[in-house]
Amino acid sequence: MIEALQHQLHLLPPASHLAFAAGAILLAYCIFGLAGFGSSITAVPFLIQVLPLHTVVCLMLLIDLVLCTVLNLRERRHVDLPELKRILPGILAGSFVGLLLLVRAPAKPLFLLLGLFVVAVFLWNNVFNRKTTRISTWLALPLGLGGGVFTTLFGTGGPLYTIYMAGRIDDKRALRSTLGVLIGTTALIRLAMFAATGLLSNPAVYRLALLALPVALAGFLLGNLLHDKVSSHGVKKVVWVILLVGGASAIFKGLS
């Protein structure tokens, strides 16, 4: 019994790495509870500092499948199906490209790509983005394609989906519902792809997920608790600073 437990513990990362990962997941899902977005794009740049990329991507997928998908099911009746159908072909194509890169590309260029993407999201939302008129349906393909690539690679394609959906859907409830179902759908697509390629065959991923799920749930509940007690403007400023730090750390890891 003791030997079996020691073997299971040996398969896990060092305690210091686990503690750092737990802090990143707690922070990421606290932000998700506060702002309604940002779990993967917050967590992944920090998690890759202490865990292999493949492990991180699979870990975040399992957490999102259990937590985010279930939480979004209650809003599914408000989904904008026409817009969902427009963007899904691009997402499917991008997902295959992302899977190919995840399986075959070396890790360091991917870390650099992740960091540059996070910084680009920061710049778009804080420097370049200006509220404009309704965007064209032609953008469904490129934004879906890019979102599929980054969702499969890092679980971080959400900002690209949001750009499209926010430019097409005016009703806030329908927007949130459509994005929620879209995130759940992309999680199921990744689940099938990762299972088919053997990325989910590592037992350590499931052990880490069991450890991480209570932490993610605690972060989400904490974020919900703080939602009405802190200003949305202040929350957004903190989120963007954290994202910028995470992006910079991913770029540094890719260059080192």
Image (spheres, rainbow, N blue to C red):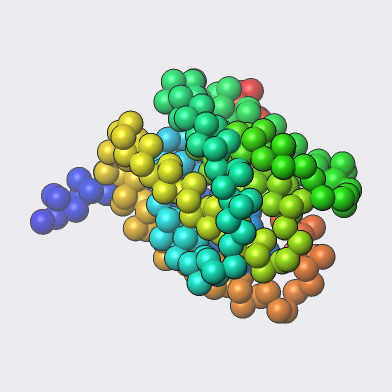
Q: Position of residue 109 (x, y in %)?
A: 58, 22
Identify which residue is drawn at 43% across, 42% down.
Answer: 190
Query: Closest to the observer: 126 or 53?
Result: 126
Identify which residue is drawn at 19% across, 53% down.
Answer: 5
Q: Is residue 227 above or below residue 108?
A: below
Identify which residue is drawn at 73% across, 47% down.
Answer: 163
Looking at the image, residue 196 sits to the left or right of residue 226; the answer is: left
Q: Quadrant of the C terminus?
A: top right
Is residue 237 shown to the viewer in this render? yes
Looking at the image, residue 44 sits to the left or right of residue 175; the answer is: left
Q: Quadrant of the N terminus?
A: bottom left
Q: Quadrant of residue 12?
A: top left
Q: Is residue 221 above or below residue 83?
A: below
Q: Quadrant of residue 143?
A: top right
Identify which residue is drawn at 33% across, 31% down.
Answer: 197
Q: Position of residue 67 (x, y in %)?
A: 46, 62
